[in-house]
Image: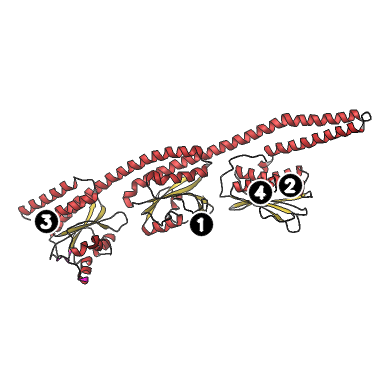
Amino acid sequence: MTAESRIQELIILKTIAETLNRSNELIPMLNIVLDKLLDATGFQAAWIFLDTGTGTPSFAAATRLPPALEREECLPMRCGACWCLNRYRDGRLENAVNILSCKRLEDALEQQSYDTGGITHHATIPLGSGGRRFGLLNVADRGRERFEAEELALLQAVAFQIGGAIERMRLYAAEQRRAALYAALGEFSRALGTEAGSAGGAEELAARAVSLIPASFGWPCAALLAPLGDGWSVLGLAPPRAEQELGEPLTGAEGWPFHSAESGDSASVTGEAAAVWAKRLGLDGESGHTPASLLAAGVSLGGRTGLLVIGCDITGEQACPDREVLEALAEHIASVLEGAMLEEQRRELARWDERNRLARDLHDSVSQMLFSLSMTARGTEAMLTGIAPEEAMAAVREMQGLAQSALKEMRALILQLRPEGLEAGLGLALAAYGRQLGLRVELEPGGLGRLSRGMEEALWRIGQEALNNVCKHAGTKEARIQLQVRENEVILRVADRGPGLAEPRAAAPTGHSIGLSTMRERAESLGGRLRVSRANGGGTVVEAAIPLRKTREPEKEENR
């Protein structure tokens, strides 16, 4: 290399370096650099393909392309495969090389409709920095089939400069995006704190938290999933879809993103895999729009590990800030939901404490007075025996009967407020309650399982009301109780051996019986159902089925 050539090369590199340091906007900078490169070297055309994280570079910038490549907004550059892109994708392009021919130019020559400007071949140079790959630089010249070794070395040096500038700009953009996302996380935290004050429970709060994510972070969609048996249920979805029901099970949950729940690490998918999972999770939106990538992170949900999945319009390393903020967001949502669940438990304990206090007060005051009234009436009856007219004796006996009935009702109310024996199991507690009502109760064995406090209490109330109906209306003193705890639901059946209903009722009516309406409302408040029907061989069956996947408890405690 002559001294003059060496000086010219240094001038070119200096010009390129100055150009690269003037801007932080990638694509405009690349177009300017390509212009400077062609001005300094005299080559005819140049273009760049950038790798956005998918492994296959896409067309990003170009200057002075011939009409055959520039037509229809550079359409030939944006579609189809070629030798240089295939070699880059396979990891076989490490240094600047001469390309024997360009497939895009060959296609243009075959069509004979557009001018190629005399270009048939080009040189390809990988863009990179510190072992990281960013794409390709292609340079072409009229009538040139090969580039000299000195020219390729110069282009390689320019490619290193461009690669370093790309890395600097991407790091700068990542820091800017990271700062913006963490600022959005602060706003999200304040908004979620406001929602926590009005949400009806942890499950409703989870749905509200997900609904805030798109507007807060600019991510197009989000979903929160909770484990359910061998599958998953959707606790929250944004934007919401009319056909997507919250709590609806997602079966066959294997592979991405569910291994994130096991490992505790975040994970992502792009391209066709992102489209498949977006559709499956309901994240493709009503319009069918698919985000460029999906990111997932584990969320702690009261001893279980759920999943927070978001859609993102960027991929690869550019999405690193989004992944970091997603993990922080998952931890924050888990903390808020845990606080909501603890608050629900606190309120539940407060309700039980209040019930126990009320039961003690009733027992110590009203119940004792009724008992004293009963004893006084009995003593008065004994004193009037043989003295008072028959009418006075009848009145005293009536007063005694009323006192006994009131005392019995009061003790039943106390038992309902403060159920005893639940620690031994719901079925045994209901059987004991039935025997206190004077019933002969048969308890059939069923599946065993641990129920939540709210579910156990609701089934206790339903069973009480059903046994009360047997005692008052069935015309029999025999009842049968069956409690089954299955994988996805718990079923309570209370049957009698009476004459049965005049007409079978598929579900509890709303207006005929306050007791039946109350049972139905308690079952439906937990997402379940109540069915009242005629038993085979006579009698009536009350069946309550509550899904175990529903965890929301009733807002109000009703003593009906």
Which of the two discs, 4 and 2, labels the residue nearer the N terminus?
2
Residue shown at the point (71%, 32%) measured from the top left? 362
Rendered position, 75 above or below 484: below
**Eyeballing the image, is 473 above or below 137?**
above
Q: Are marks 4 and 1 in contact (CB under 8 Å)?
A: no
User: Is residue 389 located in the magenta-colored stretch of the structure?
Assistant: no
> 396 left or right of 121?
right
Residue name at image x 23 percent, y 66 percent: 104
Report the residue that reaches farthest toward the right.
386
Residue range corresponding to the magenta coloring: 111-121
Identify the mark at residue 479; answer none if there is no mark.
none
Q: Is residue 436 visible?
A: yes
> For mark 1, what is the residue?
251
Q: Look at label 2 and name its amino acid.
A: Asn
Instruction: Give the Cα distance between marks 4 and 1.
Output: 35 Å
Q: Which residue lies under the disc numbered 4? A: 510
- The secondary structure type at the circle numbered 4 is loop
Q: Circle 2 sits on which residue?
A: 469
Amino acid carrying label 4: it is Thr
Inter-mark Cα distance, 4 to 3: 88 Å
Comparing labels 2 and 3, the label whose residue is closer to the camera: 2
Is residue 483 visible to the viewer in this orientation of the structure? no
**Earlier-in-chain disc, 1 versus 2:** 1
Question: Could you say where residue 252 lies in the image, as x and y percent from the top left?
Answer: 49, 58
Mark nearest the camera among 4 and 3 is 4
113 is within the stretch colored magenta: yes
Q: Main secondary structure of the magenta part?
A: loop
